Image (cartoon, coloured by chain):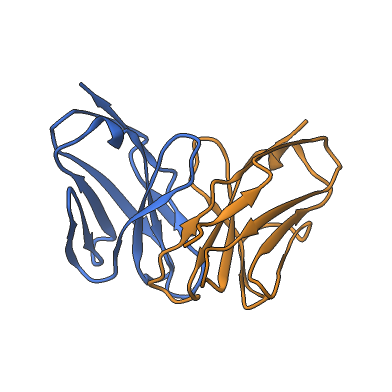
Chain colours: A blue, B orange
């Protein structure tokens, strides 16, 4: 079967750093996406990884290890507006269109 | 550049009824995907349309059907509604069906089935 695991909820302090992990088991691998979703809103794209390593984009970075079926999203200098759900999604090798989504990690930022 | 729009925002139906949800893709995008998102869950892929043809489908029954029009807008139709169909329905457009394409999501339609 195809499975993506993320922690259900995490709490962090404003100004700190937080790492959200994602592990996946899919029929092959053709890229991993991270999306941010505020409550009641649509997901918005954060990052895309297809090769091993770290992709940095401002305060957000995403890491991928294909051999371990593992990714993480790193958020630095946390702001209150970063309170949201963070969704990990994988495109399987046998699909050029379908994304398999995790249930999302709800991140709560405290002052 | 116009973003992805969906209508209606909210909808209440009763079991057994039929519903049509609409989506207008972002300008220049020819691919649209539909997702169902239950509360507290990630989106579940329903199907994707590319240049007016369905080119992929998730694990949803045939009573979930769709259309894509020449202007790349799209509809999701659900027949014989069931209580479990209550969810947020998201459409997402992209430039093509390629693997690296970022999908741009609309605000969603919240469907409640009573």
Which residue sits at x=65%, y=65%? Answer: B73
- Residue B81: which quarter of the image? top right
Left-right relation of A50 to B98: left
- Split into 4 quadrants, where in the image is the C terminus of chain B? top right
Q: Is residue B61 above or below residue B17?
A: below
Q: Residue A2 placed where, x, y %?
A: 46, 59
Q: In the displayed orientation, state which residue is furthest to the top.
A: A111
Residue at far front of view: B1
Q: Position of residue B91 (x, y in %)?
A: 58, 56
Instruction: Work out whether residue A28 or residue A33 is closer to the camera in this orientation and state it.
Output: A33
What's the residue at 29%, 70% (across, down)? A50
Residue appearing at x 82%, y 35% in the figure? B14
Up/down of A13 relative to A52, above or below: above
Residue shown at 44% from the left, 48% from the top: A43
Please tell me how many numbered marks the rendered image carries: 0
Q: Quadrant of residue A26?
A: bottom left
Q: Relative to B12, is A70 on the left or the right? A: left
Q: Position of residue A30 (x, y in %)?
A: 37, 72
Q: Is residue B37 left or right of residue A22?
A: right
């Amino acid at each position: 079967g195809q499975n993506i695991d993320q922690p259900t909820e995490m709490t962090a302090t404003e100004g700190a750093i937080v790492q959200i992990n994602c592990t996946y088991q899919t029929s092959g691998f053709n890229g991993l996406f991270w999306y941010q979703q505020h409550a009641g809103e649509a997901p918005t794209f954060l990052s895309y990884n297809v090769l091993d390593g770290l992709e940095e984009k401002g305060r957000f970075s995403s890491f991928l290890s294909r051999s371990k079926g593992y990714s993480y999203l790193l958020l630095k200098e946390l702001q209150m507006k970063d309170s949201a759900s963070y969704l990990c999604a994988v495109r399987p090798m046998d699909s050029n269109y379908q994304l398999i989504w995790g249930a999302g990690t709800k991140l709560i930022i405290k002052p | 550049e116009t973003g992805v729009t969906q209508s209606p925002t909210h909808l209440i139906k009763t079991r057994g009824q039929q519903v049509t949800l609409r989506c207008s893709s972002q300008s220049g995008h020819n691919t649209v995907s539909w997702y169902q998102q239950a509360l507290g869950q990630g989106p579940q892929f329903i199907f994707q349309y590319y240049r007016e043809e369905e080119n992929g489908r998730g694990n949803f029954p045939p009573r979930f059907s769709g259309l894509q029009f020449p202007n790349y807008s799209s509809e999701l139709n659900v027949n014989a509604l069931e209580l479990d169909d209550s969810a947020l329905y998201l459409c997402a457009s992209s430039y093509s069906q390629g693997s690296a394409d970022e999908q741009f999501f609309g605000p969603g339609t919240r469907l409640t089935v009573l």
